[in-house]
Image (cartoon, helix red, strand yellow):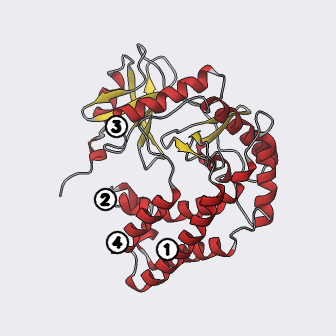
Amino acid sequence: MSLHPFENLTPDFILDAVESTGVWSDARIYPLNSYENRVYQVGIEESQPLIAKFYRPDRWNKQQLLEEHSILRALVASGVSVVAPIEFNDKTLFEHKGFHFCLYNKVPGQSPDADNMDHLFRTGELIGEMHKVMKGLSLQHRKYLMPLEIIETSSQKVLTSHLMPTSLKVRYKTLVDDITRKSEKVIHNYWPENTQIIHGDCHRSNLLLSNDQLYLLDFDDCTTGPQIQDIWLHLSGDITQQKQQLSELIEGYESDQELDTRQLPLIDPLKAMRLIQYSAWLLDRWADPAFPKAFPWFATEDYWLNHLGQLKESLTQWGELTK
């Protein structure tokens, strides 16, 4: 049985890679929570620890990663609070024996509170600042966000997988077909003519509150799409709660620039897309030994029954948020 590429990331490998940038480690390594990539805190002699991020092989090419880093440099230059890779001799992206990696300064902190209205206002404000800068930039090497395509390709992966019980596949396809029909109509009516670069995966865990300063991090999934994609991911709870949260996020966003609120109906198809895409992502990564260990419930019937329940709920709540 062949090893997964990440199993090559032994302590010696990690230290050799980090020291190839010119810093000297004290050999202390602590793995941090990350599944798509691998992230480690690495001790540095007579200095603060650094964070080393090793990108998943064959996911992004060098041009795509350099575009991500160039966006982060532009955001830093404009005073937007983001966690960006460190430059060594004008370079932020490095390669070591087949792995692309970069280093970050350690920023201690925690995610903002999901139901804290002040945190939500500040989150909206920060997203608005980010979008204002990224509006003037472009991506040449990454695909646009295309919800209908993602729904189709992701659902096909699920339907052809042996991990979903055969007895549930007809129900799953029926729900996905309903979601697709509703999504086609909403996207046709409300998809903005002028999309822009967005974070793409701007959920609460990709924000960091440190010494009362809010930072954005992890721009792995930056893409071109509607602004609302970076906002709706901060909604949680029932529809009443989500309406209150959305109002606070928009108020914060519009303290810096106007939000195109005609995009609000897109939240429903974007939510459904993410639900479907998440299951397909777990299927794609199931050969990575870290995934069965971290998500053992994924291979159970209960997971899929719950997933069907989530899809049905998304249809039941369709349009409620914007009433």
Answer whether labels 4 and 2 touch (C-beta < 8 Å).
no
Q: Is residue 50 above or below residue 187?
A: above
CA distance separating discs 2 and 1: 18 Å
Give whichever of discs 4 and 2 has the lower sequence position: 4
Give whichever of discs 3 and 2 has the lower sequence position: 3
Whether residue 28 is visible, yes or no, is: no
- In the picture of the structure, the residue carrying the numbered disc 2 is 287
- In the picture of the structure, the residue carrying the numbered disc 1 is 303
Give whichever of discs 2 and 1 has the lower sequence position: 2
Q: Which mark is residue 61?
A: 3
CA distance separating discs 4 and 2: 13 Å
Labels 4, 1: front one? 4
Residue 183 figure quarter: bottom right
Give whichever of discs 1 and 3 has the lower sequence position: 3
Residue drawn at 36 percent across, 43 percent down: 56
What type is the residue that disc 2 sits on?
Answer: Ala
What type is the residue that disc 3 sits on?
Answer: Asn
Q: Left or right: where does residue 22 sit relative to residue 127?
A: left
Number of residues whose C-alpha sits closer than 10 Å to that of mark 4, classed few (under 14), some (14–19) or many (20 or more): some
Q: Which mark is residue 161?
A: 4
